[in-house]
Image (spheres, helix red, strand yellow):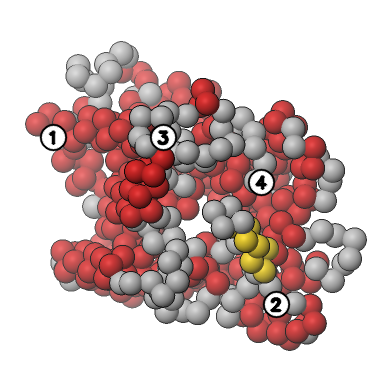
């Protein structure tokens, strides 16, 4: 029995059969594209760092998760689905060209974006601060993301080639490059039925990184590539999410069928309850920008900070954050499965195209941010103007996808 059918039975918000997602068995799953498109609301609201109506959802208000975790999870699942089928049919060797090509596309896109932003700095009438510096709100410190212009053109080129510079809004793509280079090893281990060993190795690396003392608190201690993205997304930490997402994608049907069994449906409900628990926890986050009515005060501020800093740090992918991502993913996927038809009719037209062209949208949003930051609108610090900025950016990105603007030159 399949999860899609099980969720329609009494005990899981049963209404009408016609709302269920019609499982066609295709590798491309529009629910995953929908989720990826939906996550762009979080990404745009955070990267276009203006307090707006979207902030009430995007700034870790539905749980201690961000767009990065979900994008990595979805990338891994889709990789496991697509290359898993090829792996079963023709072996690891047939997967290598596609994986290397994908890593190459990601690398080229990263270098080109880094260089374009770097070159735009030479135009004095363009303010590039939003994409060439990183502001740490906790220490109120600004960090330059590019070498000073005096360092010269070739220094900029060298840093770009080594992914040692670039907009922090785009740096996760550097992580993708390395993860896709690791994927042949992941698939090889799976093909040899060494999945448990693979999982154990991945977890041991993750735990070792999590426990290692940090020379500078709040800064990743182990950065094996030397690339800039490792400050925010150290490979030794974030590989654990990708590895297990690839495994989940490869065994998607087995996982779905397991959850579909009546005796196992409690696991879905457990994920729902835990997701609500994490939401309750995150709403206690003492963020000064939020009005009192949008915050809970059941957890003492110091206690919250101690728990958050101990188990929910983003850069090292704390275990609490990792667990939150898993249970929230299952919850959202289950809801989309059970109510797919009405949700798809209402919102699929918008979110699915964004999800299908996620790398393109991810690239475009960096330049949209440059455009917005060079207008007087952000300086107004107006809630409704900021909300309009976020809506405008999402709509422009969606329209660019629908019109396939520059699709011939940009990977998508």
- Closer mark to the observer between disc 4 and disc 3: 3
Give the spatial CA distance, label 1 vs label 4. Answer: 41 Å
- Give neighbour class at mark 3: few <14, some 14-19, many 20+ (Cα, 10 Å): some
Mark 4 sits on what residue? 48
Mark 1 sits on what residue? 264
Which residue is painted at 56% across and 58% down in the image?
139
- Please report contact status of discs 4 and 3: CB closer than 8 Å, yes or no: no
Decide which of 121, 220 is in the foreground and name it: 220
Which residue is painted at 67% across and 41% down in the image?
50
- Please report contact status of discs 2 and 1: CB closer than 8 Å, yes or no: no
Hey, which quadrant is residue 90 in on the image? bottom left
Circle nearer the N terminus (1, 3): 1
Circle nearer the N terminus (2, 4): 4
Mark 2 sits on what residue? 147
- Closer mark to the observer between disc 1 and disc 3: 3
- Closer mark to the observer between disc 1 and disc 4: 4
Circle nearer the N terminus (4, 3): 4
Q: Is residue 351 visible?
A: no
- Closer mark to the observer between disc 2 and disc 1: 2
Residue 35 percent across, percent down from the top left? 45, 40
Residue 224, compared with residue 349, is above or below; it is: below
The label shown at residue 284 is: 3
Which residue is painted at 21% across and 33% down in the image?
270
């Amino acid at each position: 029995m399949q999860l899609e059918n099980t969720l329609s039975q009494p005990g899981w918000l049963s209404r009408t059969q016609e709302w269920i997602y019609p499982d066609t068995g295709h590798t491309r799953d529009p629910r995953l594209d929908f989720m990826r498109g939906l996550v762009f609301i979080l990404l745009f609201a955070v990267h276009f760092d203006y307090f707006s109506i979207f902030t009430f959802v995007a700034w870790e208000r539905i749980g201690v998760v961000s767009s990065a975790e979900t994008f990595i999870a979805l990338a891994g699942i889709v990789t496991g689905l697509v290359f898993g089928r090829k792996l079963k049919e023709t072996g690891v060797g047939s997967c290598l060209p596609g994986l290397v090509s994908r890593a190459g596309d990601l690398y080229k896109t990263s270098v080109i974006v880094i260089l374009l932003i770097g070159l735009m700095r030479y135009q004095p009438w363009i303010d590039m601060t939003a994409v060439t510096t990183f502001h740490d709100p906790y220490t109120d410190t600004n960090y330059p993301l590019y070498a000073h212009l005096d360092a010269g053109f070739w220094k900029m080129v060298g840093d770009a080639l080594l992914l040692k510079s670039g907009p922090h809004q785009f740096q996760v793509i550097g992580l993708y490059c390395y993860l896709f280079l690791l994927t042949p090893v992941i698939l090889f281990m799976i093909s040899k039925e060494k999945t448990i060993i693979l999982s154990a190795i991945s977890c041991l690396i993750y735990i070792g990184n999590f426990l290692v003392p940090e020379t500078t608190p709040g800064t990743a201690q182990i950065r094996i590539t030397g690339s800039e993205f490792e400050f925010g997304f150290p490979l030794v930490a974030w590989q654990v999410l990708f590895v297990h997402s690839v495994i989940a994608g490869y065994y998607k049907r087995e996982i779905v069928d397991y959850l579909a069994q009546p005796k196992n449906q409690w696991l879905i409900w457990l994920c729902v309850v835990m997701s609500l628990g994490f939401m309750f926890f995150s709403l206690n986050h003492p963020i000064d920008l939020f009005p009192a009515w949008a915050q809970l005060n059941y957890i003492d501020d110091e206690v919250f900070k101690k728990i958050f800093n101990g188990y929910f740090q983003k850069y090292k992918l704390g275990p609490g954050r990792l667990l939150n991502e898993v249970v929230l993913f299952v919850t959202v996927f289950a809801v989309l499965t059970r109510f797919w038809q009405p949700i798809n009719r209402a919102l699929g037209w918008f979110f699915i195209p964004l999800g299908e062209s996620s790398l393109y949208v991810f690239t475009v949003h960096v330049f949209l941010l440059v455009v917005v930051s060079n207008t007087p609108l952000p300086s107004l610090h107006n809630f409704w103007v900021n909300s309009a900025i976020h809506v405008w950016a999402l709509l422009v990105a969606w329209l660019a996808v629908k019109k396939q603007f520059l699709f011939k030159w940009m990977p998508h």
